[in-house]
Amino acid sequence: MKVIAQTAALQEALALASSIVAARTPKPVLQCVKLVASGKTLTLLATDLEAGCRYVISQVEVKEQGEALVPVQKLADIVRESAGEEALTLAVEKDACSITGAGTRFKLLGYDPAEYPAVADFDDAGDFQVSAEALSGLVEKTLFAAARAHSHYAISGVLWEASGKKLQLVATDGHRLALAKTSLPKAAAREVSAIVPAKLMNLLQRAAVGSEETLAVKVTETQILVRTARAVLLSTLVQGNFPKYADVIPKEATCKATVNTEAFMHRIRQAALLTSEDSKSVRIGFSADQATLTSRAPETGEAEVRLPVKFEGDPLEIAFNPTFLTDALKVIQAEGASLEFSAGNKPAVIKAGPDFVYVVMPVDLA
């Protein structure tokens, strides 16, 4: 194999590939990237046996077709430190790969490419298409609410549901739930329901954020595959039963507060300054035209801040973990948000337009 590759394109591909491979593994080949030069492209394959990618670089000149398997981090380091050069030449002889630039030459010892696990390809229409911008927004509005570590493994991922021309993502950690939805450019080929791991969601953010392209999505019994203009990203699905989230979202509310998103978030952060790990809560009292936020840390002091609001219903007092509120408010792009309550000890609902719903459990006022 011998190719001349544009350095910037190679660096971008390796940044994604190196974020996938296992940092520690008893199998050295899983810390490698597979290079396949064929036709007029160079394809990079990376996997940790759960997530993976196939990244195609077209800014190359293929002198000799072939394959190589080399340590991804070392190759990424070499390419990054060669950023000032327009192109690099990669040449493979047996299991060794030479990377040559203007005045530089590196030799990386690799492995037999045949030892590398297969990485699935995605060469059909898939189940549905979604704009990269819309999907990036859904990920941002839900992933933060997924469980980091939990015995109920299903909630460590995010539920994707596609039906007709709608796609919605749902995440929960048992204390809060985030639901976001968007419209698809055309109806899905079939109904889809799958629990997608956080790792793939983060990879999608890296690969699709700021892009105007349309992504294709395909779901099998065990995998999800997402095709971008340059790459196919894939992951095994999280197995298990996702909670019946519709039962968690309150159907009725007796009180409703309308707030300025930025101002409310600012006041919560101010009140949160005087909380502690033992008393990590902010108490909010709502009245007709004002919200009063208070907090107290026995060893530090106390805070009281006020915020003008529009409130409908009887005066209400309720307390929350401030982080659970700010996590949701910072992904709301609308100027205003509404908070709906039924009681001080019942879940509250934050809404911003018709496409974002956030349910959060209160903290015991006692």
Image (tube, rainbow, N blue to C red):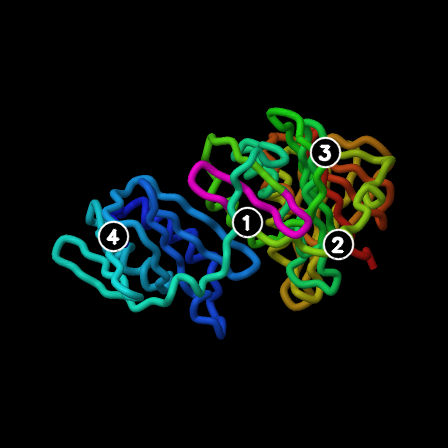
Rounded to the nearest angstrom, the CA distance separating label 1 from label 3 is 37 Å
Q: Is residue 1 magenta?
A: no
Q: Residues within 10 Å of mark 4 (few under 14, many from 20)?
A: many
Label whose residue precedes the other's in the sequence (1 or 2):
2
Identified at 62% across, 50% down, the residue is 223
CA gap, disc 4 to disc 3? 59 Å
- Earlier residue among tags 4 and 2: 4
Mark 2 → mark 3, Cα distance in angstroms: 19 Å
Q: Is mark 2 on a helix, strand or loop?
A: loop
Q: Is residue 147 left or right of residue 51?
A: right
From the image, tell me which residue sits under label 3: 338
| Mark nearer the N terminus (4 vs 3) | 4
Q: Is label 1 or label 2 in front?
A: 1
- Give the residue pinned by disc 4: 2
Residue hosting label 1: 234
Q: Can you tell which of label 2 and label 3 is closer to the viewer?
A: 2
- Asked if residue 286 can be seen in this view, the reply is yes
Q: Distance between the residues labelled 4 and 2?
A: 54 Å
Q: Which of marks 4 and 2 is in front?
A: 4
Mark with earlier residue (1, 3): 1
Viewer-closest of 306 and 91: 91
Closer to the camera in the image, 81 or 233: 233
Q: Furthest-top residue in view?
A: 186
Residue 41 coordinates in the image, percent (x, y):
34, 43
| Mark 1: amino acid | Leu
In the drawing, does residue 84 fall left or right of residue 67? Answer: left
Q: Quick check: 277 above or below 214?
A: below
Magenta region: which residues? Answer: 219-232
